[in-house]
Image (cartoon, grey):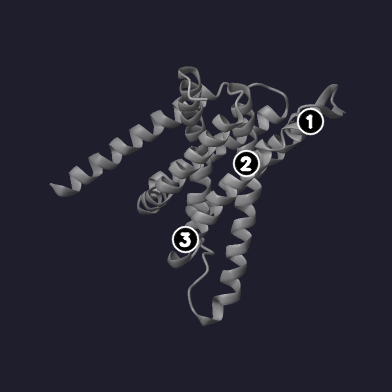
Amino acid sequence: MFTVEALIALLTLTSLEIVLGIDNIIFIAILVGRLPKEKQASARTLGIALALITRLALLFSLSWLMGLTQPVLTAFGRSVSGRDLILLFGGLFLIYKATKEIHEKVTGENDTPKTGKGSTNASRKAYIGLLIQIALVDIVFSLDSVITAVGMAQELWIMVTAMITSVLVMLFASGWISDFVSRNPTIKMLALSFLLMIGFMLTVEGTGQHVAKGYLYFAMAFSLVVELLNIRVRKVSRGK
């Protein structure tokens, strides 16, 4: 069980699962930012817990998951699988949400529920609606995560351990990431741009085209480093 090969596979898969979970954290961080401050932590925790449950449920439903790669219909002369449909609609949903958020930031609109007695029902509905959105997007992100795990590891305990570890890392980092994004409007706009890119990538993959994710993640990392340098420069300039 604890051979060198198994431990290497566990370390590699855990690292990949953490990388694949970054886009999930970004989406959750942006959504919970619309809730009152006192509800954001619980929404993040529930959202990440839903991500773990979704991943494990898909993992233990391997026969059903593998069936998603089988053609279910034919469109424009090519076969379309269940996985393609999930990625396609998931990608379009991400594009819609990111575009809507960018529009509201640019125009100054803000429909975050206000705290107070008169807004209790609206706040509760917004909370439940947010969790439903997170659950739906978790399915899309979890699909790639589980397929990657199945392709890389043969042992079930390795896949389960890697997923639980990556979700614990997500849980630990989600609060800091959410606070950092909310404190820096330019980072939030950059994160929304990342979601647009991820949504576009998922949509393209849903049409049967392969996208090299390495290029996408490199572009995201490079843009983030440049923006962090800009934030540092602005702080130094204000200090003079």
Q: Are marks 1 and 2 in contact (CB under 8 Å)?
A: no
Residue farthest to the front, as pictured: 1
- Seen at 62% across and 38% down, the residue is 142
Q: x, y percentage for residue 22?
A: 48, 38
Q: Residues within 10 Å of mark 3 (few under 14, many from 20)?
A: many
Tell which tag, 3 or 1, sits nearer the viewer.
1
The residue tagged with tag 1: helix, strand or loop? Answer: helix
User: Would you identify the image quadrant in which residue 92 lies?
Assistant: top right
- Reading the image, the residue beneath label 2 is 56
Q: CA distance from mark 3 to mark 1?
A: 37 Å
User: Would you identify the image quadrant in which residue 208 lies?
Assistant: top right
Q: x, y percentage for residue 111?
A: 54, 64
Q: CA distance from mark 1 to mark 2?
A: 17 Å
Label at residue 150:
none
Give the mark nearest the N terminus, 2 or 3: 3
Give the mark nearest the N terminus, 1 or 2: 2
- Reading the image, the residue beneath label 3 is 40
- Reading the image, the residue beneath label 1 is 67
Question: Callout 1, which amino acid?
Answer: Gly
Q: x, y percentage for residue 77?
A: 85, 21
Measured along the vertical axis of the image, is residue 231 above or below residue 103?
Answer: above
Tell which tag, 2 or 3, sits nearer the viewer.
2
- Seen at 64% across and 29% down, the residue is 147
The residue tagged with tag 3: helix, strand or loop? Answer: helix
**Left or right: 91 in relation to 111:** right
Q: Are marks 2 and 3 in contact (CB under 8 Å)?
A: no
Question: Callout 2, which amino acid?
Answer: Leu
Give the mark nearest the N terminus, 3 or 1: 3
- Residue 239 seen anywhere in this rendered image of the structure: yes
- Residue 107 seen anywhere in this rendered image of the structure: no
